[in-house]
Amino acid sequence: MMVYCGIDEAGRGSVMGPLVVGIVRTDGDEGLVSMGVKDSKKLTPKKREALYAEIVDCCDACVIEMPASEIDRLRKSVTLNEIELGMFAEAFDKLSAETVFADCPDVNERGFSGSMAARCGGRCKVIAEHRADDRYPVVSAASIVAKVTRDRRIAEISEEFGIDIGSGYPSDRITMDFIEKWIKENGRAPKHTRCSWEPVRHLMSLAANTKISDW
């Protein structure tokens, strides 16, 4: 019986909140298929929560989380793809298997697969592909675990600030309005914000220029 893992992330492009990598290990897709797993982006929040409970009940599953501050620190010397590669390898260390299927963040699928296999000590076969969360049920399951975990963290951040911060993505007007208002009022980005992201750097630059022109 072959045991294999699926790995995927949530929050890669967000400006607030953590980057979360989910990993799920199973010895067969039948159970995952029957419960209706699919790419987490194609599911409602309520359905994701329900599937999350089923996934962790029938499979081994865990997450790796990296806060915004650590992403900013690492981004000074490595790319986001390299950060994600390291998190994928860390996830594998927690739930190792003979074969790993991963949603590939890099344009070079073969190169990323080889790099990840090396980071995992050559202990597994790595199949990293674009849209793997659509093609492999175990990766779909990992995407759900990652997405639900990240959504919960965003809810916790909203509770911490006492206001809805939105989804945490730069395309979300609620998120960007919150960050912009905070910067104007406090002269710095709010906690849990990725200050190395261009939209945030732009808002910080605007705030600085406004202050200079006020003199």
Image (cartoon, rainbow, N blue to C red):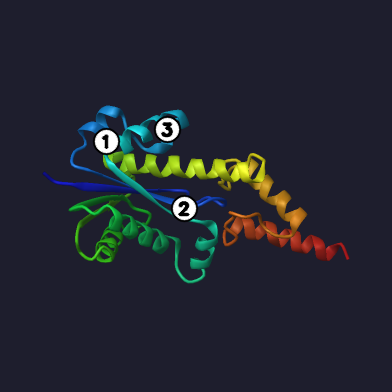
Residue 121 seen in this snapshot: yes
Horizontal side of 105 relative to 181 (left or right) equals left
Mark 2 vs mark 3, foreground winner is 3
Q: Which residue is mark 1?
A: 58
Horizontal side of 35 relative to 173 (left or right) equals left
Mark 2 vs mark 1, foreground winner is 1
Q: Residue at x 74, y 60 (%)?
A: 187
Point out residue 181 in the picture as x, y percentages from the top left corner. Answer: 73, 49
Q: Which residue is mark 2?
A: 19
Point out residue 139 in the picture as x, y percentages from the top left corner. Answer: 30, 43
Which element carries disc 2, helix, strand or loop? strand
Which amino acid lies under the numbered mark 1 shown in the image of this protein?
Cys
Dot 3 and dot 1 residues touching (CB under 8 Å): no
Which element carries disc 1, helix, strand or loop? helix
Tell me if residue 166 comes above or below residue 17 in the rendering.
Answer: above
Tell me if residue 84 comes above or below residue 160 in the rendering.
Answer: below
The quadrant of the rendering that contains the N terminus is: top left
Give the residue furthest to the right: 215
* Dot placed on the residue nearer the N-terminal end, 2 or 3: 2
The quadrant of the rendering that contains the C terminus is: bottom right
Q: Which residue is mark 3?
A: 49
